[in-house]
Image: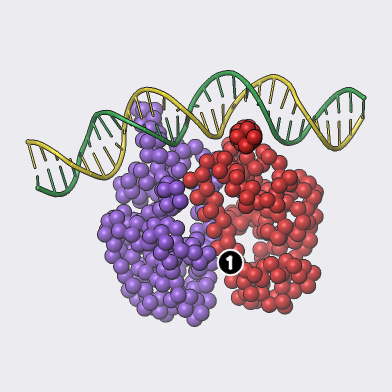
Chain colours: A red, B purple, C yellow, D green
Amino acid sequence: MRFPKLFERLATLAPLPPEEWVKAEAVAKEQSLAKRELFMRPGDAADRFAVVLQGVFRGVRVSPRGGESIKAFRAEGELIGAYAEMLQRLPSMTAIEALEPSHVLVFQTRDFQQLEQGHVCWERLARRVAEQHFVLKERREQEFLELSAEERLVKFWEEHPHLKGRVPQRDVAAYLGITEVALSRIMSRRRKRAE
Amino acid sequence: MRFPKLFERLATLAPLPPEEWVKAEAVAKEQSLAKRELFMRPGDAADRFAVVLQGVFRGVRVSPRGGESIKAFRAEGELIGAYAEMLQRLPSMTAIEALEPSHVLVFQTRDFQQLEQGHVCWERLARRVAEQHFVLKERREQEFLELSAEERLVKFWEEHPHLKGRVPQRDVAAYLGITEVALSRIMSRRRKRAE
DNA sequence: ACCTGGGCTTGACCTGGGTTAAGGCGGAGG
DNA sequence: CCTCCGCCTTAACCCAGGTCAAGCCCAGGT
């Protein structure tokens, strides 16, 4: 077992027999990415995903009109991939970019489907992951519905303290649904109020 | 089998043997709700869900500060329930209210868990449902990130034509994340532009 | 026919965030 | 050491949407 810590983490979502984990590692490949390198680009087939071993990524949705918005940041222990597109068997509409020199463990979805055939535990895990993702998206939806940009900012740093200093401000703005100019204003407003 | 149409619809998500469906119907209870009646209220245990047989519902999130926002509308063939809270084993934070005289088929989650023990098909179905919900929430997130209120409105009616005339305007506004005043203005603006 | 109330509209005014454009500042490379 | 570039800030101006308040329309009840 090459990654016991990762195994423990995943096993908290659904019971995973160690021998199944060994099978999973057999089909996984490690990959290193330089800062700014893309794990996935728009138009790619959404046929693989990865676990972040080291580094931070941003998932960028590039709209037809050229606007960039950020769907999520992902750090150590989290999954990267065009999940929604994978489920719908569509080509990826998002770019996934390393914000630091990073290191990931890559799975092909076809290999993962093989694992699912072999043991129900993988299917259970997939369900948990889907449910987890849903809960997070719903939380985010609710924040858009009832919080101001400033309140969303505060909550963002409460919920993602580990991203401090690792993601550029403009990306935080794009995640919150505002421009970097607005974010800068909000921050100076708070600074003034605090002093 | 009391609800063959419903069965067919669900079976498109994941294969369901008819005999399993019969077991499901055995534990389900029909319930009728008057207009404005609540299927679930904030604080209730999130231990049951239902399929809408007839009618329309709104899922209302009541924020601590008293603001109301609408998470979703649900009509015939769709599921109602405090799904996120159920997954997190939290009491419901949403009210689910009938907008018309309605008729639903209710399942207790404990009964459903029994079914899951009996046959994997239910677990597969649950996974599909979670994935489906995720895809929808992600779509909504993306709309908040890159569309104006007016564009969201247009998209809303494109995607939910069957709700026309069945949901009050103020609720559509709350769903879009704006006030009914703003919605009214947007509509008159469009009327003017169209003429 | 008259009231009543709920839901929609309209207007006046305010505010937050978008847009554009002009700096400031610190780090990497010449 | 200077320059350039990427990133952040600030300012000026505009507009969408919020808030408050007054009205309108119509369906239901008496």
Q: From the viewer's side, name the closer residue of B14 and B98.
A: B98
The quadrant in which residue A82 appears is bottom right
Q: From the viewer's side, name the closer residue of A151 and B38.
A: A151
Image quadrant in which the N terminus of chain B is located: bottom left
Percent position of residue A156, x then y: 61, 47
- Determine the residue positioned at 49% across, 64% down: B90
Q: Kindly identify which residue carries mark 1.
A: A128
Image: B53 above or below C24: below
Q: Is residue B137 visible?
A: yes
Percent position of residue A157, x then y: 64, 47
Image quadrant in which the C terminus of chain B is located: top left
- Determine the residue positioned at 75% across, 67% down: A5
Q: Callout 1 environment at 10 Å: few (<14), some (14 to 19), or many (20+)?
A: some
Judge from the rendering whether residue B48 lies leftward or rightward of residue B145; answer left or right.
Answer: left
Image: A53 above or below B123: above
- Determine the residue positioned at 58% across, 38% down: A178
- Determine the residue positioned at 41% across, 59% down: B42
Q: Residue furthest front?
A: A195
- Which amino acid, by three-letter code, is at mark 1? Arg
Q: Is residue B9 visible?
A: no
